Image: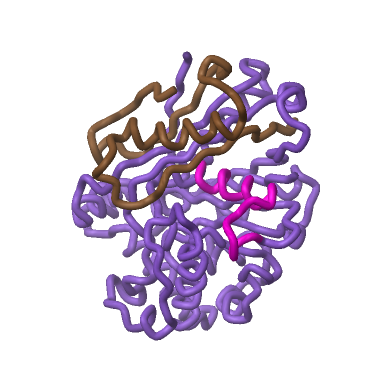
Chain colours: A purple, B brown
Amino acid sequence: MPVIRVESACASGSAAIKTAVGLINAGFHDLMMVIGTEKMCDQSTPIVTELMSRAGDLAWEYPFGVSFPGFYALHASRHMAELGTTRDQLSMVSVKNHKYGYKNPLAHLRKQITLEEAKKSINIVYPLNLYDCSLISDGAAAVILASEEKTKQLTDDPVWIMAIGSGGDYNMVADRPSLTGLIGAQMASRTAYDMAGIKPTDIDVATVHDCFTIAEIMAYEDCGWCEKGEGGKFVEDGRSDIDGDVAVNIDGGLKSKGHPVGATGVSMGVELTKQLRGKADQGRQRADAKIAMSHNVGQSGQFVHCIVYQR
Amino acid sequence: MKRVGVVGVGHSKFGKRPDVSLRELAHEAVRESFLDAGLEPKDIEASIFSLAGDQFNGQTNQNVI
């Protein structure tokens, strides 16, 4: 069987889905499988952190010791300084995601945490603590995709991929005009909404790339679920909880479910399909979910894909 | 774009998995997706393999199905 490998750092899984959708719509194939997998725990945390930081610029970022926690600490610092986001609000993202990861039997770290525990966990890179960081995990996910005609032959009640929006950014973080959001994510989500003919408020359930808690807060704003600067308040007011405006990461997210990088984008597709079928685990099903979106970020914002799923 | 259907999904347990190889790990998800879709490996025309880091355990690519 023909196989193509796709690699786009942490957004590889969504890039793989986009590649399959493109090939199906170009008429190359009618029935394809997308497999995302990664086995990271064979290496120690310092080695994995070092290997991943090579996604940063090899001349101007990596040699000076900027790792991924470092990149997102810059985002968090600027978000706090310019927009008033608080340390507690970062922790609230972590508490929410652990609450739902606890209810997901496939999650890596099934443990509920309190706001106090999250706030008092050890500092990694100011202002990010241990509980602001996602996990290094082993894992795999697979989706089988079919053309519209083939889908109708196979099932009466499919979930559809309606739109895929993508965005990018300057390779080096220092070249970017602002650190309080990801331009690639703004571009990707707007394109996806336009392509699907929907508004941000139409999304019932979403998986966003919470590699660090600040990334989820920026995602609320970048995806247009709230105004710039309101992301911290959005989680604090429960608007991203299971019964909020949009249920975000009610599978535990990268924070609690885990982040085997090549699998993550595909895992998001699996989760949203289960949510739209009404087959998510007990205690973490968004009621009456009809439209879903994944937000998957690779590197430090250079590769972003937002995929709209609909039943 | 023309819509595309999701006709089967599968997901391994995430976590520390020294009990399986990369191929066995992928197989857990692949097998479940076939059962979910009611399809067999011979039905699939082509596959896309997403793997971000060759460096994590040395494996670079494989045909899992």
Name the residue located 32 percent from the left edge and 64 percent from the top edge. A70
Number of numbered callouts drawn: 0
Reply above or below: A296 against A67.
above
A206 vs A127, left or right, is right
Q: Position of residue A162 (x, y in %)?
A: 72, 40
Name the residue located 77 percent from the left edge and 27 percent from the top edge. A152
The residue nearer to you, when weighing A86 against A236, is A236
Q: Position of residue A173 (x, y in %)?
A: 40, 57
Q: Position of residue A47 (x, y in %)?
A: 19, 51
The residue nearer to you, when weighing A122 against A72, is A122
Q: Which residues are magenta?
A: A266-285
Q: Position of residue A189 (x, y in %)?
A: 65, 52
Name the residue located 61 percent from the left edge and 27 percent from the top edge. B38
Is residue A274 a member of the stretch shown in magenta? Answer: yes
Residue lying furthest bottom in this view? A116
Residue lying furthest right in this view? A197
**Which image quadrant is residue A255 in?**
bottom left
* Prevailing secondary structure class for the magenta stretch in the rendered image: helix
Reply above or below: A97 against A300.
below
Name the residue located 62 percent from the left edge and 22 percent from the top edge. A31
The residue nearer to you, when weighing B48 against A114, is A114
The residue nearer to you, when weighing A135 against A276, is A276
Is residue A229 a member of the stretch shown in magenta? Answer: no
Q: Quadrant of the C terminus of chain A?
A: top right
